[in-house]
Protein backbone atom coordinates (compact mmCIF):
# COMPACT_ATOMS: atom_id res chain seq x y z
CA UNK A 1 0.00 0.00 0.00
CA UNK A 2 1.35 3.43 -0.94
CA UNK A 3 1.85 5.93 1.85
CA UNK A 4 0.23 9.33 1.58
CA UNK A 5 2.47 12.37 1.61
CA UNK A 6 1.09 15.46 3.26
CA UNK A 7 2.43 18.91 2.55
CA UNK A 8 1.69 22.33 4.01
CA UNK A 9 1.66 25.00 1.32
CA UNK A 10 1.83 28.73 2.02
CA UNK A 11 0.61 31.68 -0.03
CA UNK A 12 0.46 35.42 0.59
CA UNK A 13 -3.22 36.27 0.99
CA UNK A 14 -3.18 38.74 -1.90
CA UNK A 15 -1.24 36.58 -4.37
CA UNK A 16 -1.70 33.19 -6.00
CA UNK A 17 2.00 32.39 -5.76
CA UNK A 18 3.40 29.51 -3.72
CA UNK A 19 6.02 30.89 -1.32
CA UNK A 20 6.33 28.03 1.17
CA UNK A 21 6.06 24.24 1.10
CA UNK A 22 6.91 21.73 3.80
CA UNK A 23 6.57 17.97 3.87
CA UNK A 24 4.72 16.91 7.01
CA UNK A 25 5.60 13.47 8.35
CA UNK A 26 2.17 12.63 9.69
CA UNK A 27 -0.25 9.88 8.75
CA UNK A 28 -3.94 10.00 7.92
CA UNK A 29 -4.60 8.63 11.40
CA UNK A 30 -2.55 11.46 12.95
CA UNK A 31 -4.40 14.10 10.96
CA UNK A 32 -7.98 12.76 11.20
CA UNK A 33 -8.78 14.40 14.56
CA UNK A 34 -7.01 17.65 13.65
CA UNK A 35 -8.79 17.97 10.31
CA UNK A 36 -12.06 16.43 11.54
CA UNK A 37 -11.98 13.77 8.84
CA UNK A 38 -14.33 10.84 9.31
CA UNK A 39 -12.95 8.45 6.72
CA UNK A 40 -9.39 7.56 5.74
CA UNK A 41 -9.92 8.95 2.24
CA UNK A 42 -11.51 12.30 3.18
CA UNK A 43 -8.28 14.07 2.22
CA UNK A 44 -8.16 12.83 -1.38
CA UNK A 45 -8.58 15.50 -4.05
CA UNK A 46 -8.97 18.43 -1.66
CA UNK A 47 -6.65 21.17 -0.43
CA UNK A 48 -7.64 22.30 3.06
CA UNK A 49 -7.13 25.85 4.24
CA UNK A 50 -5.82 25.55 7.79
CA UNK A 51 -7.20 27.43 10.75
CA UNK A 52 -4.78 28.77 13.34
CA UNK A 53 -5.82 25.95 15.69
CA UNK A 54 -5.05 23.34 13.02
CA UNK A 55 -1.69 24.99 12.23
CA UNK A 56 -0.68 24.91 15.88
CA UNK A 57 -1.71 21.28 16.30
CA UNK A 58 0.11 20.13 13.15
CA UNK A 59 3.20 22.05 14.26
CA UNK A 60 3.03 20.31 17.64
CA UNK A 61 2.48 16.82 16.22
CA UNK A 62 5.20 17.14 13.56
CA UNK A 63 7.66 19.20 15.64
CA UNK A 64 7.68 21.94 13.01
CA UNK A 65 7.23 25.70 12.92
CA UNK A 66 5.50 27.25 9.92
CA UNK A 67 6.02 30.85 8.81
CA UNK A 68 3.51 33.40 10.03
CA UNK A 69 1.58 35.79 7.83
CA UNK A 70 0.72 33.24 5.13
CA UNK A 71 -2.46 31.44 4.17
CA UNK A 72 -1.56 27.80 4.84
CA UNK A 73 -3.12 24.79 3.16
CA UNK A 74 -2.80 21.07 3.73
CA UNK A 75 -2.58 18.97 0.60
CA UNK A 76 -1.74 15.35 -0.08
CA UNK A 77 -0.11 13.29 -2.77
CA UNK A 78 -0.77 9.59 -3.06
Image (spheres, helix red, strand yellow):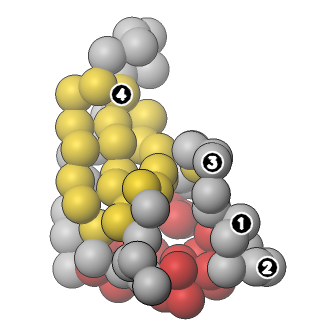
Query: Residue 30: where, in percent of width, then height?
Result: 49, 87
Number of other residues with Cα within 10 Å of mark 2, as a class: few under 14, some 14 to 19, many 20 or more: few
The vertical placement of 15 against 77, above or below, is above
Disc 2 secondary structure class: loop
Tag in front: 4 or 2: 2
Disc 3, SS: loop
Q: Which mark is first along the chain, 3 or 4?
A: 4
Tell me the distance, in whole angstroms, between the alpha carbons under discs 3 and 2: 15 Å
Estimate the spatial distance between the alpha carbons at disc 1 and disc 2, rounded to whole Å: 7 Å
Q: Which of 9 and 43 is in front in this view?
A: 43
Which dot marks residue 11?
4
Q: Distance between the residues labelled 4 and 2?
A: 27 Å
Residue in the picture at 42% in, 43% down: 72
* Residue pointed to by mark 3: 45
- For the residues labelled 4 and 1, the Cα–Cα distance comes to 23 Å
The residue positioned 39% from the left and 78% from the top of the image is 3
| Rendered image quadrant of residue 5 | bottom left
Residue 75 x, y percent position in the rendering: 47, 51
Q: Which of marks 4 and 1 is in front?
A: 1
Residue highlighted by disc 1: 42
Q: Which mark is residue 38?
A: 2
In the rendered structure, the answer to whether residue 22 lies left or right of residue 41 reads left
**Badges 3 and 1: C-beta atoms under 8 Å apart?**
no
Q: How crowded is mark 1: few (under 14 residues within 10 Å), some or many (20 or more)?
A: few
Q: From the viewer's side, name the closer residue of 25 and 15.
A: 25
Amino acid sequence: MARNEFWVLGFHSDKNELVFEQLVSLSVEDLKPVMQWVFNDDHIGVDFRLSMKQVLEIERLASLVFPQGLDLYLTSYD
